[in-house]
Image (cartoon, rainbow, N blue to C red):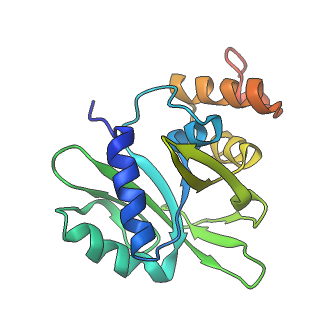
Amino acid sequence: MTEMPSASLVELLRLFEGANIPVWLDGGWGVDALLRRQSRRHQDVDIILPVEDVPKLQTLLGERGFAVSRGKPPDSFVLADGRGLEVDVHAARFDEDGNGVYRMQNGEDWVYTAEHLSGGGKVGALNVRCLTPEAQVLCHAYGYVPAEKDYRDMELLEERFGVELPPQLRRGVS
């Protein structure tokens, strides 16, 4: 398994910040940002960003050897650098209220409400934007079968933040 170490993630986040590309962490690194500690190894980083920033993101990361490895820009795709780093991009169209509509690979839309996007956390010493614990649970509850790491991530959110987990995110419940 390839790994996205925290030092590489911080470097990428500082790069995005320097290019004025706002990003929110989702997925495993989003959970760890909320926890303010790394709880496990991560294969990639999932980010949410405004769809209009996708060309700038692709250019910026292209200069560092990243290219599209899966999916189709601008909405849902993965950029990989060939050395093991992967950025899973979820681009959203934001409305005037701060809600972001993300077109998933299956063609359906997922809405990140402004409240979902109001989370904050840390990766190392860096303050980051991320999904709220409640939004993380919603994102993990629908659209795919949870893996062991997903159950563990959700249990950590439940323990730390008291979020209620739906049955499909509880071990041994079908």
Q: Is residue 5 left or right of residue 174?
A: left
Q: Residue at x 48, y 61 (%)?
A: 105
Q: Nearer the viewer, residue 128 or 148?
A: 128
User: In this rendering, does residue 106 appear at all?
Assistant: no
Number of marks in the rendered image: 0
The image shows residue 67, relative to residue 83, as above or below, that is below
* Residue at the limit of the structure toward the front, as seen here: 125
User: In this rendering, does residue 109 appear at all?
Assistant: yes
Q: Is residue 86 left or right of residue 161?
A: left
Q: Position of residue 77 (x, y in %)?
A: 38, 62
Residue 142 position by quadrant: top right
Q: Residue at x 41, y 55 (%)?
A: 88
Q: Position of residue 68 (x, y in %)?
A: 26, 64
Q: Residue at x 27, y 30 (%)?
A: 1
Residue 16 position by quadrant: bottom left
Q: Residue at x 40, y 29 (%)?
A: 41
Q: Position of residue 28 (x, y in %)?
A: 52, 39
Q: Is residue 168 left or right of residue 104?
A: right
* Residue at the limit of the structure toward the top, as seen here: 172
The image shows residue 1, relative to residue 18, as above or below, that is above
In the picture, which quadrant includes the C terminus? Answer: top right
